[in-house]
């Protein structure tokens, strides 16, 4: 059984397969964003509990989340549109936005102040957004422009206790 679903992995993939032909990309957006929000909140809570249990605090840390297409579903159930939010990584060092596609980063200060840092989609989507900026949020377009110009990051982003980590 998969937590909070009442079904096995195979059951869920079969259900997803049956819905694929009728589902548009925009139909899953609200559900994906709600699940992403829940995942982020759970990661912050778990990190706070771990710190409390071990008797320390983190002045700042990052939560790095990747979204991937479920390869098993694509192969077994011929459903290429099943996506999965991978387990979040809580870390004190900042990951690079250039290391992978389809990933999100938030920073957390004072153990509960969450700030969105960036979201990097696939290169083809970046290209589309930059070619059609009027269809997207101005701040998101600005962030992607900085990403493509390699100005999204600053050296200070990688300092931990005054040293590059």
Image: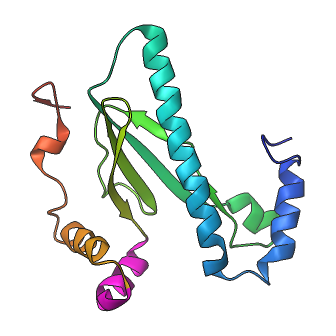
Q: Residue at x 47, y 35 (%)?
A: 44
Asked whether, in this view, residue 39 is left or right of residue 121, the answer is: right
Q: Please indicate, yes or no, whether residue 77 appears anywhere in the rendered image.
A: no
Q: How many marks?
A: 0
Q: Was residue 132 drawn as part of the magenta stretch in this picture?
A: yes
Decide: is 109 above or below 97: above
Q: Is residue 141 above or below residue 153?
A: below
Q: Quadrant of residue 124?
A: bottom left
Using the image, determine if residue 5 lies above or below residue 138.
above
* Residues drawn in magenta: 122-135
Q: Position of residue 43 (x, y in %)?
A: 51, 36
Q: Nearer the viewer, residue 42 or 154?
A: 42
**Where is residue 17 shown, x and y percent of the image?**
83, 71
Residue at (54, 58) in percent of width and height: 67
Q: Measured from the top left, where is residue 69 in percent x and y? A: 62, 64
In percent of the image, x 30 and y 58: which residue is there?
98
162 sits left or right of 6 in the view: left
For residue 39, say whether it is visible.
Answer: yes
Q: How is the image coloured?
A: rainbow
Relative to 100, is 2 above or below?
above
Quadrant of the frame with the C terminus: top left
Main SS of the magenta part reads helix
Q: Quadrant of the N terminus?
A: top right
In magenta segment, residue 6: no
Q: Quadrant of residue 83?
A: bottom right
Within the image, what quadrant is residue 108 found in? top left
Q: Nearer the viewer, residue 43 or 21?
A: 43
Q: Residue at x 19, y 60 (%)?
A: 152
């Amino acid at each position: 059984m998969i937590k909070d679903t009442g079904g096995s992995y195979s059951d869920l993939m079969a259900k997803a397969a049956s819905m694929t032909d009728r589902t548009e990309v925009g139909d899953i957006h609200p559900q994906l964003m709600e699940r992403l929000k829940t995942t982020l909140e759970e990661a912050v809570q778990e990190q706070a509990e771990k710190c409390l249990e071990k008797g320390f605090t983190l002045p700042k840390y990052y939560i790095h989340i990747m979204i991937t297409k479920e390869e098993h579903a694509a192969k077994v159930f011929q459903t290429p549109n099943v996506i999965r939010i991978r387990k979040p990584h809580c870390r004190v060092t900042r990951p690079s936005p250039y290391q992978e596609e389809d990933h999100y980063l938030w920073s957390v200060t004072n153990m509960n102040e969450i700030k969105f840092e960036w979201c990097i989609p696939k290169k083809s989507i970046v290209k589309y957004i930059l070619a059609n900026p009027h269809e997207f949020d101005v701040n998101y377009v600005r962030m992607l422009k900085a990403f493509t110009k390699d100005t999204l990051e600053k050296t200070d982003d990688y300092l931990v206790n005054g040293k590059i980590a």
